Amino acid sequence: MTHSSKSLEEKRRREAIAAATCLTEALVDHLNVGVAQAYVNQRKLDHEVKTLQVQASQFSKQTAQWISMVEGFNQALKEIGDVENWARSIEMDMRTIATALEYVHKGQLQSACS
């Protein structure tokens, strides 16, 4: 081998190494971009999950408050119904007493007149 062919071979070897190095760096850069994007996406997802957890917790508390309000409303309606029944019962008792008093009064009038 002559000096120029060795020199040419050495030059081609350096060019091949340089090309392989460039290719490796390009592949690593491409891979790093994907990894970086995956990391950014994961952070976004983590943030969204935390936001959803907070919102779900708030919704759960709000729902519990609504359930409590509805139960209180139902209890108030029941109490109104109980008062209405009590008022009807008192009204019936008063009518019975009024009727009894009328009979007694009529009986006393008839006794006094005879």
Image (cartoon, rainbow, N blue to C red):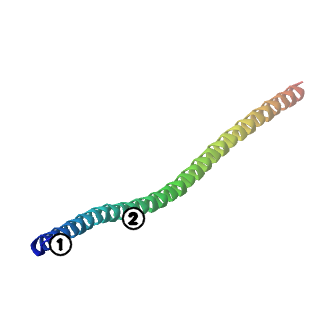
Q: Secondary structure at mark 2?
A: helix
Labels in figure, total: 2
- Residue occupying the far left of the picture: 4
- Residue occupying the far front of the picture: 1
Q: Residue at x 20, y 66 (%)?
A: 16
Identify the disc placed on residue 38. Answer: none
Q: Quadrant of the N terminus?
A: bottom left
Give percent across and percent down for residue 86: 72, 40
How crowded pointer 2 is (Cα within 10 Å; few <14, some 14-19, many 20+) is rated as: few
Instruction: Say whether residue 30 is left or right of residue 63.
Output: left
Front-most of 34 and 1? 1
| Mark 1 or 2, closer to the camera | 1
Give percent across and percent down for residue 75: 65, 47
Instruction: Say whether residue 89 is left or right of residue 54.
Output: right
Instruction: Say whether residue 13 is left or right of residue 47.
Output: left
Tag 1: amino acid? Glu
Instruction: Say whether residue 91 is left or right of residue 19.
Output: right
Q: Residue at x 40, y 59 (%)?
A: 45
Occupied quadrant, residue 24 = bottom left
Give percent across and percent down for residue 111: 90, 27
When the figure is inspected, residue 21 is found, relative to residue 75, above or below; the finding is below
Front-most of 45 and 36? 36
Instruction: Return the disc, 1 or 2, that comes first in the chain's sequence.
Output: 1
Residue at the disc numbered 1: 10
Tag 2: amino acid? Arg
Residue at the disc numbered 2: 43
Q: Quadrant of the C terminus?
A: top right
Give percent across and percent down for residue 74: 61, 44
Front-most of 35 and 77? 35
Q: Secondary structure at mark 1?
A: helix
Check contact, mark 1 vs mark 2: CB within 8 A.
no
Give the distance between the C-alpha atoms of the residues marked 1 and 2, in whole angstroms.
Answer: 48 Å
